[in-house]
Amino acid sequence: MPEGTIIKGIGGFYYVKTDSGIVECRARGKFRKSTDTPLVGDNVIIQLSENDHTKGSIEKILPRTIQLVRPAVANVNQLLVVFALHSPEPNLLLADKFLVAAESKGLDVVLCINKIDLDEDRNRFKELYNIYKIAGYKVIGTSCKTMEGIEELREALRNKITAFAGSSGVGKSSLLNAIDQRFSLQTGEISKKIERGRHTTRHVELLELDGGGFVVDTPGFSTFELMDISASKLQYYFREFEPYIPYCRFSSCSHTSEPGCAVIEALNNGAICTSRYENYIQFYNQLKNKKEWEK
Ligand code: GDP
Ligand code: ZN
């Protein structure tokens, strides 16, 4: 029986991409009753209708690596964290929140600094680029106006299932359109409002990339709450802290104020960036306080 990936689900139909094209599938009764209903992104085994090979039914859902809630999509393996150089101003606290979320879920991450056409001398770009390069991430500067960096972005998305994250207005839809004109997503606040008015329910869809791989079409994540992460685990989601952690004097070091803290020493030497460290402290305090309320 053929295998494929669900790229869209509307009104009880699932559109499954297989090696021989898209097959419109119904889910078998057993899926509709259980909590384990098929999700966009699921790899499935299908049975084709005898007389029409463009139709079929989903027989089995293959194991999921991960399931995101909003947007509801399975098997995403990369997060593209987007911010703009200007308009809106970069929100590094939010960017670091997305990075923590991605690290905690084991997703690959790429950072995209968009609207670089708005920065003539490139100083602001270099500053932001360095923060995340030093932290150990791949960083791509892009412009949907000049198309600079778009080819590099396409390359980073190849053969992955990528969800975009970032505040509204940073250019997530514009980037998707720049990657492939066929995507033709609405951009800008006003046209998006009109679009939302027309379609009351927004369906998640995987858009297939020319070079292989998919992107999630809903620029879904614009905020993110650190919920199920414990304060003591947070340190491991700041990947540049990792080499220093074993050298802290106390094994229970929270890297906030302890003597002999190797992370703070690395901060003072410039090996860890101030903005990243400050955001760590802010998240740490939030998570620690949350724990105390729960007690
Ligand atoms: P989203 O909310 O993140 O999906 O952002 P949009 O794609 O809707 O873009 C928001 C606004 O920024 C739109 O008016 C775009 O034309 C504009 N924009 C997007 N990318 C760029 C860029 O690279 N440079 C400039 N100057 N403007 C951009
Ligand atoms: Zn420490």
Image (cartoon, grey):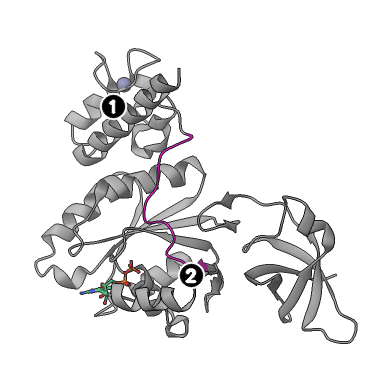
Residue 292 in the figure: left or right of residue 117: right
**Secondary structure state at the residue bearing disc 2:** loop
Residue 57: give x, y in percent of width and height: 81, 71
Q: Residues within 10 Å of mark 2 (few under 14, many from 20)?
A: many
Quarter in which the N terminus is drawn: bottom right
Residue 135 visible in the shown view: yes
Q: Nearer the viewer, residue 136 or 236?
A: 236
**In the rendered view, would you say 246 is above or below 213?**
above
Which of the 4 image quadrants contains residue 174? bottom left
Secondary structure, mark 1, is helix
Residue with the mark numbered 1: 263
Image quadrant where residue 86 sits: bottom left
Magenta part of the protein: which range? Answer: 215-228
Q: Residue at x 15, y 70 (%)?
A: 118
Magenta-span inclusion, residue 241? no
**Residue drawn at 35 percent across, 12 percent down:** 250
The vertical placement of 157 against 91, above or below, is below
Inspect the image, locate mark 1, and give the three-letter code of the amino acid beneath it. Answer: Val
Image location (x, y in percent) of residue 84: 24, 63
Is residue 186 among what the camera can see?
no
The quadrant of the picture occupied by the C terminus is: top left
Q: Position of residue 109 (x, y in %)?
A: 43, 53
User: x%, y% of residue 224?
Assistant: 39, 47
* Vertical relation: 125 (above or below) 7: above
Kindly identify the residue that appears in the image at 29 percent across and 79 percent down: 147
Left or right: where 52 falls relative to 148: right
Q: Check the image and name the residue furthest to the right.
A: 50
Q: Main secondary structure of the magenta part?
A: loop
At 29% from the left and 49% from the top, the residue drawn is: 132
Vertical order, 74 against 157 (above or below): above
Circle 2 residue: 217
